[in-house]
Image (tube, coloured by chain):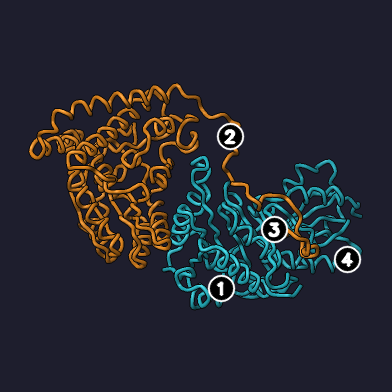
Chain colours: A orange, B cyan
Amino acid sequence: MKFKDRESLYRHLYRTMKTIRYFELGIDQQYKLNIVRGAAHLCLGEEAIAAGVCAVLEKEDYIMTTHRGHGHLLAKGSDPRFMMAELLGRETGYCKGKGGSMHISDYSVGVLAANGIVGGGIPIATGAGLAVKMKGLPNIVTCFFGDGAVCQGNFHEAMNMAAAWKLPVLFVCENNQFAISTRTSKVLAPEKISDLAAAYGMESIQIDGNDVMQVYETAERFKKGILAGEGPKFIEAFTFRLAGHYIGDDENYRDKGDTKKQWSNEPIVRFEKWLEANCPALLPELQAIDAEESEAMQAAIAEAVAAPEPSVDIIYDDLFTHSAAWERRNVNEKDYNQAGN
Amino acid sequence: MRKITTRQAINETLSYQMEKDDNVFMMGEDIAFYGGSLKVTAGMFDRFGGERVRDTPLSESAIIGAGVGAAMMGMRPVVELTYIDFSFVSMDQILNQAAKWQYMTAGNIKIPLVIRTQGGGYRGNGSQHSQSLEAFFTHIPGLVVCMPSTPFDFAGLLNSAVEDDNPVMFIEHKLLYNVRGAFPDKGEQVRIPFGCADIKRAGSDITIVAYSYMVHKTLAAARLLEEQGISAEVIDPRTLNPLDYDTIMQSVEKTGRAMVVAEAHENGSFAKQIAHRISEEHFGRLKAPVKCVGALNVPIPYAKSLEDHMLPDEGNIVACAKEIMAYGQAAG
């Protein structure tokens, strides 16, 4: 994304984080009213990673994300109204209600998909990177995933392949320290997740994922390097999952007092402090941005709640695309010589 | 017309598709300089180079996953799983990724991916290199499953698979690579649609549905049955999903008797799916129960005596047909 000056960048980052925050809080509210079904996985506390990385990307810099992907989708430019509708299972949603929270795709802003299988998107991102390289496009592919995913076989296969083939992929690991109830530090062999990437021979760094400016600057530097042909790169963005794994998680595996303390380190509060020190001129605008995003989200919720569920008539739609290979005609070697066979 | 092997048919068809469309490329283990473990892609590396005929690391899940990702970006990958027995290393990418994205996103995403693989026994390769696993893939909505039996059918379905925008599981058979069959002259291309069965042998007494290598064993069995006065109609579905039930049902209307032959283990075999559909739709008109021929439910052993015993052969097919023909003739 291009910004005409630093202040525009800061405004964008702040607004993006607020959009994500209000979206997630809105989902939480709708879930507790039983309007959102199944499971929803909130990224409260991780907004800076989505905002900071996606601000560096152009539309054709595609991203892959995860079950905890609402933030990445919004930061990339997806419309919260259609995302809200999708989570509410309405026909006006991005996937006409067929995908739900974990399976949203939006090519129009450069999102390949969110993925419900932990680590499932990493090889896919590697393949997208392969396509970018084969087509000679001036783009990168960004793959978001969590600390849980780095223990998956898919992670290792895909990282190795991307590094061996020098593919233009930016791997971003949101280490929010928990894989559902398991503290990652207890089940991970290396000290730092970024050490794993270094083992595959790619440039790798661990940063403070709650510092949106550090996220932005690191992503910008890495993107430049990838486009210059340096091969894939890896950012471990260290953060903390403020919400439970899913809405309704009683979080009995961690101390509620500790979690409460972590709120004082959350990215929006951190950025406000940073702006106070580095760009105080912007401070008066922040309240207005906050109010606008809050209102916009309420409107999106109202619109989604009012929309209809998809009709059962669409149940078989898009199971297959019906091209010439689906037009019934008998073809046998005996009568081969007819034209058109 | 000329006669070529299945191996040549696949090689010619892949080469034609690679020539025609720059978006088509191939990935797999040992497919480049080595020409493939079963030499199916021989010569293609020389012709198209290592970018488009690409050797991969030994990473089945990343191979299929990278195929999914490249397909999402508009390429038309043809990826290879050296043995279908290894497909489960990458099963998530096939089941939960390739097959589902188009539906889950209401058509926003397309996955024009072809996964070529091969299975089958009879060669002493042991239980982890000899399996027939098509049942697992037919159970996945959203995945086209092709399992042709002759060079002509291989070429026709492979052309359709590469040109089609849906994910296709293209299951070859190691014993079919050397089988020869009638084939158009060089430069002429065949296209066979999905869901289009082929009557490999016309008959009037009993309908035998068979696919892949079993088509050849069934045709041999049909010749033996003919000598015993039984006229078998052999139907090769060619694609298992979508499956051409119409052609099968028309045949059963005519014969009133049916059986299904598959190389796979009998328990949970896809043959049972076909057999049950026939029973469901023709119950009142059938002259006998619909039966299946399949492998015994043991992992495929290495010793020839054991492997030959547990995999289907012409004798099993003939015996099953005769049981069906004899049904209702009072015993004693």
Residue plotted at (20% across, 54% down): A206
Q: Are marks 3 and 4 on the same chain?
A: yes
Identify the amino acid type marked 2.
Ile
Q: Is residue B274 visible?
A: no
- In front: label 3 or label 4: 3
Judge the density around disc 2: few (<14), some (14-19), many (≥20) Cα neighbours within 10 Å.
few
Q: On screen, B250 above or below B22?
A: above
Secondary structure at badge 2 equals helix
Name the residue that disc number 2 marks. A314
Could you say where residue B65 lies in the image, as x and y percent from the top left?
Answer: 45, 57
Could you say where residue A51 lies in the image, as x and y percent from the top left?
Answer: 26, 42
Secondary structure at badge 4 equals helix
Looking at the rendered structure, which numbered label has been put on residue B226? 4
Identify the amino acid type marked 3.
Ile
Residue plotted at (49% across, 78% down): B33
The quadrant of the image that shows the N terminus of chain A is top left
Name the residue that disc number 3 marks. B192
Identify the amino acid type marked 1.
Thr
Name the residue that disc number 1 marks. B41
The quadrant of the image that shows the C terminus of chain A is bottom right
Q: CA distance from mark 2 to mark 4?
A: 49 Å
Q: On screen, A327 above or below B317?
A: above
Residue plotted at (17% across, 44% down): A211
Q: Are marks 2 and 4 on the same chain?
A: no
Q: Nearer the viewer, residue A273 or A137?
A: A137
